[in-house]
Image: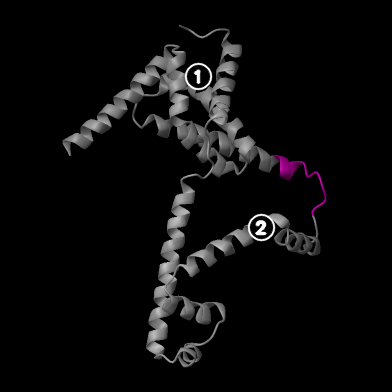
Amino acid sequence: MDRARTALQSAADDDLSIARRIAAGDRAAFELMMRRHNRRLYRLARAALRNDAEAEDALQDAYVSAYRSIGRFRGDAALFTWLARLVLNECFGRLRRENRRQNVFPIVELPSSADIEAMSANESDSPDNAAARAEVRALVERKLDALPEAFRVVFMLRSVEEMSVEETAQCLAIPEATVRSRHFRAKSMLRESLAREIDLAERDLFEFGGRQCDGVVAKVLHRLGAAEGEWTR
């Protein structure tokens, strides 16, 4: 418990130290802060805005705001939490402005319900959606192939072929109770296997690093340098 409290205090001290260095005009500290939190903050912006370019722009604006108001950071919350609020405020502001533009300045005539249905049908049959469905199907098929045969066959008959418990039991010459238990177990194993796959994929969602990370840092530093003439040393 003491170690955990010490670690939290150390993190708070580190946040305050970085904030104070930035407030004093330390360029290296500001760059360190951006690189330390870039990935998580970008993913937050990307999740809110659902657009890569908009997320980068929002992140840059939030960093500029953070630099200009860093003197107000008192360490009551983690620095990441403070930054996250700035990022979300920027994102929500953009969404509100976009909604206002759409409501006040409609550019095209609203489609009819028939048009919407036609567009939905076309969208669902688009090559991208078809490819995505094919990838999901291939993943499920791989996971299904990995199940033990006894469970795999019951799952295919019950879930894919939609046979009743009675029909499946008759087909395999096993008790209905066995069909139910194997079907339940097969679905459980599939869910667990797919959940592990999703957990692995989630770690790479909205990946942000390398040139993207360097680009955001460089653009923010350039904007601040242009606005203030030269960094305070």
Q: In which quarter of the view is residue 57 placed?
A: top right
Q: What x and y, as percent, mark residue 182?
A: 40, 79
At horizontal 80% and vertical 44% (from top left) the residue drawn is 107
Say above or below: 2 vs 143: above
Q: Is mark 2 on a helix, strand or loop?
A: helix
154 or 71, which is in the foreground?
A: 154
Q: Magenta segment range? A: 101-110
Left or right: residue 222 compared with residue 165: right
Give x and y (percent) for residue 115.
Answer: 80, 61
Q: Residue 131 carries which label?
A: 2
Q: How many labels does the image show?
A: 2
Amino acid type shown at disc 2: Ala
The residue carrying mark 1 is 68
Specify the principal SS of the magenta part: loop
Q: The residue tagged with tag 1: helix, strand or loop?
A: helix
- Where residue 62 sits in the image (x, y, percent)? 53, 28
Q: Is 109 colored magenta in this rendering? A: yes
